[in-house]
Image (spheres, grey):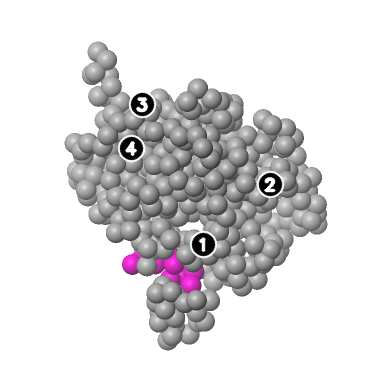
Amino acid sequence: MTNVTDQHFHEGTRHSGKSCQERQGDLIMSRPFNEWTFTHMNWLLPSERVSRGGFRFPLPGESRPLDLTYRFDGRDHTLADLHRRTHTTAFVVLHRGAVVHESYPGRFAGPRARFQLFSLSKSITSMLVGIALAQGAIGSLRDPVTAYRPDFAGTAYDGTTLGDLLDMTSGVGGPEQWDLPGADIKRFEEACLGRGTVLDVLRTAPRTAIPGTRFNYSTLDAQLIGWILEAATGRTLAQYAAEHLWSRIGADRDAYYWLTRSRPRTAVGGGSFNATARDLARVGLLMAHDGRLAGEQIVPRSWVRRTDVRTVPHLAVGALGPSGYDHYGYAGQWWTLAGDHRAFTGLGVHGQYLFVDPVADVVIVKCSAWPDEDDPSRDRETITALQRIAEHLDQRSDVLTA
């Protein structure tokens, strides 16, 4: 059955020189389509439910205006400026576990809307790996890829460990260049939409560095992490996430992974998780509180603290090279930030953020619909604003407790 969006896809490709199938990836991501597609991915692709289960954990507090400005490019800006300039669709701020601000500027957004989180999915997958390690389903981060996926013997991933994948130091593949035809990430996207297979993309990726020596941001690495997790647990990503994470955080709604059109259909552990902004804030709360929620240890504390590992030279803030911005470091599928507050963030293309400041006890979710996958200026402005919010709330706490 062809829905309205499919008709737009056909109209948008009629004179493009590309087939509808070839152009769908571009159209899903482009404005103004993306404000709709980023909240309706399960209308466009197969999906698998991540059940919330029966446990409920209401978030206390209520939204109120945040009266602050942040300084960027020599000018002061309000949060309304941030939302306008960076195409915010959802914005949720928690302080000390309570909602202090919530807004949904997006045209199709709201508390029940489930947002396409893109590479923020990587951070969810990392949490699942930490749980699987604690349960003994995964033996060690030093385990080679081939211990779980022997079909990768003889590929560029032969000799790479799970730890290498988690820190994006596999030594496989080149930079993620969305605007470069034939780049690994474009081949991956095309395979997800049905042109070729995702497995073939990963198995044919070239070796470009010695494992463990160089950071290179890679959705291919994250995809392999998801497959290792599935092989180790005997469960799909959606099943494992439901059983060991989503059903334990008191989520408002089921989440879902969209699945590839190519067969065998698979979740994209590095990019296909969809959830409400409030539920994503619950995930951030878990990370801010050392993996505990409602008195229960859900993610091992030692695993959460991996985001504090900032001493590896090629993963330190400012040392990631051309594959990362200079205000970030990297640790276990999370981006680390400088400063005493040990702040870190999950990131997804087109402006998806899960910002966590464990010292200030601040969690901020920002979903967006940027016109481009990556935008260094919008990213730097967003991080500047989020850090300013955390600073503002932390200062207010000091005043109230003085």
Q: Could you classify mark 2 by the number of other residues whose Cα lies within 10 Å: few (under 14), some (14-19), or many (20 or more)?
A: few
Q: Secondary structure at mark 4?
A: strand
Going by the numbered disc 4, the residue's amino acid type is: Val
Cα separation, mark 4 vs mark 3, equals: 10 Å
Q: Which residue is mark 2?
A: 235
> Which residue is more in the foreground, 283 or 169?
283
> Which residue is more in the foreground, 274 or 371?
274
Going by the numbered disc 3, the residue's amino acid type is: Arg
Q: Could you classify mark 1 by the number of other residues whose Cα lies within 10 Å: few (under 14), some (14-19), or many (20 or more)?
A: some
Tell me where residue 32 appears, x and y as whole percent: 33, 67
**What mark, if any, has residue 177 been given in the picture?**
1
Label 4 vs 1, first from the N-terminus? 4
Q: Which residue is mark 3?
A: 96
User: In percent of the image, x 66 and y 54: which residue is there?
Assistant: 172
User: In percent of the image, x 48 and y 85: which residue is there?
Assistant: 17
In front: mark 4 or mark 1?
Answer: 4
Q: Secondary structure at mark 2?
A: loop
Cα separation, mark 2 vs mark 4, equals: 33 Å
Label 1 vs 3, first from the N-terminus? 3
Cα separation, mark 1 vs mark 3, equals: 38 Å
Left or right: residue 123 versus residue 380 is right
Cα separation, mark 2 vs mark 3, equals: 34 Å
- 65 in magenta: no
Please indicate, yes or no, whether residue 286 appears anywhere in the rendered image: yes
In front: mark 2 or mark 1?
Answer: 2
In front: mark 1 or mark 3?
Answer: 3
Magenta segment? 23-32
